[in-house]
Image (cartoon, rainbow, N blue to C red):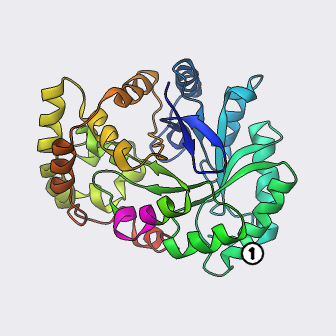
Amino acid sequence: MRRTQLGSQGLNVSAVGLGCMGMTFGYGSVEESRSIATIERALDLGVDFLDSSDHYGPETNETLIGRAIAGRRDKFVVATKFGTYSRETPPRIPDGRPETVRWAVEGSLKRLGTDYIDLYYQHRVDPNVPVEETVGAMAELVAEGKVRYLGLCEASAATIRRAHAVHPITAVQSEYSLWTRDAEEDGVLATLAELGIGFVPYSPLGRGFLTGAISSVDSLADNDFRRIAPRFQGDNLAANRKLLGRLQEIATERGVTAAQVALAWVLRAGESVVPIPGTTRPERVDENTAALDIALSDAEAEELSAVFAPGTAVGDRYPAPMMATLNG
């Protein structure tokens, strides 16, 4: 397995990670045994970078990972997040208050069954708390040894700069794929390259859309998030599916899958880029890691970039209330 240094603070991870959200949250129910088998297969292949959040479940995702890594914590690089799971009623989300940082990390450590978290992200920026205060509290966790490296999720370029001035930010996680190119347009990718911060694209396969397997939400579980995601609705999905032709043609020409070509395209985004495709099936981990062996030509990559040009996808990637929490 190829390794990548994520950011400039020394965090070394597998060149492709494993997004674990779908094992307990977002895409329907999954048997725990299959999820753990997926993590087992990832480790067999050298994929040691696991991504979670206290929001996923909530809590159950971290608990699952804790069981999967028990007795071999040192073989994994564990990332988790805080700030979108609230202890209050009504819930305060996002929540970046220093006291919430402290409360959240203790819960995550307990559920993960560990005394340290490798990479700790603020899941969404709290517009009511200066990011300097939140990151200052996160930096205290680093000083105490409870957290090794810090990250932000779905933060704007300006926020990243402010946070990085308080304590080095190792990685920023944002949705990024052929049909989600926001990080190019809003200056985030350029800012990360300038500051020496790693980039962790989540949903690099467009929540399964880029595999070509989703023709209607009717086939999805009743509690699958994509049933309410605007890009997957009716006419929007029909229009978006028209973009897939050239991606599938390149995959056929190369004798690989569309998912592998889509991942190979994401991997070209920079030297310190580690996508975290999510899956709950061991065989998909094999498929995703094999994308590391695909070197797209400049012509192929440019053609795909043109087909999926920013703004081409029809529909927002989240419902309106969730869109409001992005790029904070």
Locate residue 136, reporting x and y percent.
77, 69
Identity of the residue furthest to the right in this view: 144
In this view of the protein, can residue 189 be seen by the observer?
yes
Name which residue lies at 11% across and 43% down: 245
Query: Which residue corresponds to the image point at 24% horizontal and 66% vertical from the top-left?
Result: 311
How many labels, in total?
1
Q: Which residue is mark 1?
A: 133
Residue found at x 44% / y 48%: 223
**Mark 1: few/some/many CA within 10 Å (<14, 14-19, 20+):** some
Residue 172 x, y percent position in the rendering: 54, 57
Most foreground residue, 80 or 320: 80
**Relative to 43, residue 258 above or below:** below
| Residue 185 magenta | yes
Q: Where, by quadrant of the figure, is residue 181 drawn?
A: bottom left
At a point 18% along the width and 26% down the height, the residue shown is 254
Q: Is residue 85 magenta?
A: no
Residue 242: where, in percent of width, then height? Answer: 12, 51
Q: Nearer the viewer, residue 291 or 5?
A: 5
226 or 103, which lies in front? 103
User: Would you say the magenta stretch is mainly helix, strand or loop?
Assistant: helix
Q: Nearer the viewer, residue 298 or 162?
A: 298
The boundaries of the magenta stretch are 182-190
- Image quadrant assignment for residue 307: bottom left
Element marked by disc 1: helix
Q: Amino acid at mark 1?
A: Glu
Q: Position of residue 51 (x, y in %)?
A: 58, 43
